[in-house]
Amino acid sequence: MTRTFTGRVVVPGAVKAEALVTQAGFNTLASFQKSFMFGDKSAKCSDQNNADLYGKPMHGKALCLPQTIGSTTGGMILYCAAKLDRHPACLLFSKPIDSLAAAGAILAGVWTDVPMPTIDSLGDEFLEVVKDGMKVTVAEDGTVTVE
Amino acid sequence: MLLTEEQQALFDGAKGETIAKIVKTLVMYGECFGAERMVPVNSKNGHLVTSFGLSVMKPVYELMDELIAAGAVSEQPFSVDPRPLDKNVPANFLQNIFFKVMYSKQADYEVQLGKLGLMNTDAFTCTCYMDAVGNKPLEGEVLSWAESSAVVYANSVLGARCNRNSGIIELFGSIVGFVPAFGLLTDEGRKATWVVEVDTVEKPEAQVLGSAIGMKVLEEVPYVRGLDKWLGGELDEGACDYLKDMGAATASNGAVGLYHIAGLTPEAKRLGDALIAEGAQVYKVDDAELRRVRDGYPVIWKDAAAKPVLCFVGCPHLSLGQLSAWTASLTEALARNGRQKVAVPVVFTAAPKVVEEFKATPDYQRLLGTGAVVSSICPLMYMNNPLCGKKPVITSSNKLRTYTSARYHPDAEILAQIAGDAGTASEGGVS
């Protein structure tokens, strides 16, 4: 079944990708740490405290999350992920975006050639509906289709 | 976003493409949170979170090179988080090799920081607001800082105004001298949406109380009642140390950027209940609630009963008073146990300038005499790698517990373990 959600555009862009979903807050530093250290281009999530994501590749996925948590290096880490080509295809937030994730998405948008379209405020139901592996389509206007 | 004529000119490229991109970044960042204008950064100094020359962070160093080449350096001198390395901190052969590779860009990055506006080579600490360090903002000043524990302290205890910025964003604000006005920079954003009522039989552990508050209110602003009973009505050294540690736990266990303490912190003293937003939620904290929170911390050591091999005290960095207090309690406990040296290797961390002051006191040699190490390292950076992550490390820091595999114990339990009290894990028992 196809469902459509509308959020607010933080960084515009259109993209199609496979969903990767975390119900818990996304700890940016902990999640990318091992990928950065050991050169894992698929960017397998290294946050042991996140049972939804741990060990799963994040590169090229439609990362569906409530908010990010953790160190204030978070925005810088997202920027590095984009520059190193290990970033998610897009960031889809159920809640209003937090300041660290916003910084990361905007830094990637302004300072790299590989922006991550970023939509926030998609609503709690978005995270109830979307599951790992579903096909996600993001439109320029902030419409997110899940099927 | 309504920019001034001067800001608009920068946006349009009057001072080059790099500055234009910086302003564009700050405009997008502000618009994301409903900011309608920029406000001047009027503190004397900035503070950056990124202090580590991790070899894999090449994009950051390239960006710094771009800034330096364009002359886009900080208008205000800044301090920065602690260094990730110190050869005095215990590490085995493999760890030392790993650290060398992992932080191979440290020296190069410090050169970049110097060009960008680093205050001085001793300005590496998360507690830049200590008097000895010299980056202590005044009430009402607008800051462009990152480092969650420093931001929450500056907002709450000093009454300065700063959002929870990310690394790089904070540098951009210091470079152009303005930041978007939203969130904790506004009167409305500083209102409390939670009232925390503390009612405990004993003075609550700062680190556990902060953790409980952070987990409950997440990124919102709490107004805490009942704590002045334990801390008094003046921000003396003891109260500031307590709030430093409590605040770091609120910021790391949640995402708190500002708290008010009734009858104690500057805005709470001046404005009282008027700081509480309509419809604020209430969270009651008693001894049972603090116990529940602490009991919920997972132990992620492979062997939960393992004997600790290292202990870190000082995340965030300790004050001079805390170093002296630890010296007194540790030497007394060792004497009581008939020991000369600590039972678990222990590292006390403080800002380089605070350590310098400490060295001038007789306590310094007393503390070294116990076998303890005094360092200005960042325990988080030390722990954040697979080799150290496997070691059974104990700490009195809830922040270190949150981000690493280190196991939290309150100060009294840490003291018992490092002093080798009978029945503690350091003596082979179960703590």
Image: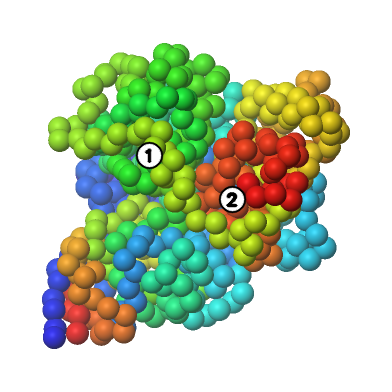
Give me the residue at 39% from left, 62% from top: A26
Query: Observer-nearest residue: B92 or B165?
Result: B92
Q: Nearer the viewer, mark 2 or mark 1?
A: 1
User: Label 2, on which residue?
Assistant: B407
Callout 1 crowding tier (Cα within 10 Å): few <14, some 14–19, many ≥20? some
The x, y position of residue B94, in whole percent, is 79, 66
Query: Observer-nearest residue: A135 or B203?
Result: B203
Q: CA distance from mark 2 to mark 1?
A: 20 Å
Query: Observer-nearest residue: B120 or B228?
Result: B228
Q: Left of A12 or right of it: where is B72? A: right
The x, y position of residue A141, in whole percent, is 16, 71
Residue B267 appears anywhere in the view = no
Q: Is the C terminus of chain A in the top left, top right, bottom left or bottom right quadrant?
A: bottom left
Q: Looking at this view, name the residue that lies furthest to the top.
A: B233
Give me the residue at 47% from left, 25% from top: B203
Q: Is residue A41 above or below residue B172?
A: below
* Label annotation for residue B289: 1
User: Circle 1 — which element?
Assistant: helix
Q: Mark 1 — on which chain does it sit?
A: B
Q: Left of B168 or right of it: where is B52? A: right
Residue B419 appears anywhere in the view = yes
Q: Left of B389 or right of it: where is A41? A: left
The x, y position of residue A146, in whole percent, is 20, 80
Q: Mark 2 — on which chain does it sit?
A: B
Give me the residue at 65% from left, 39% from top: B414
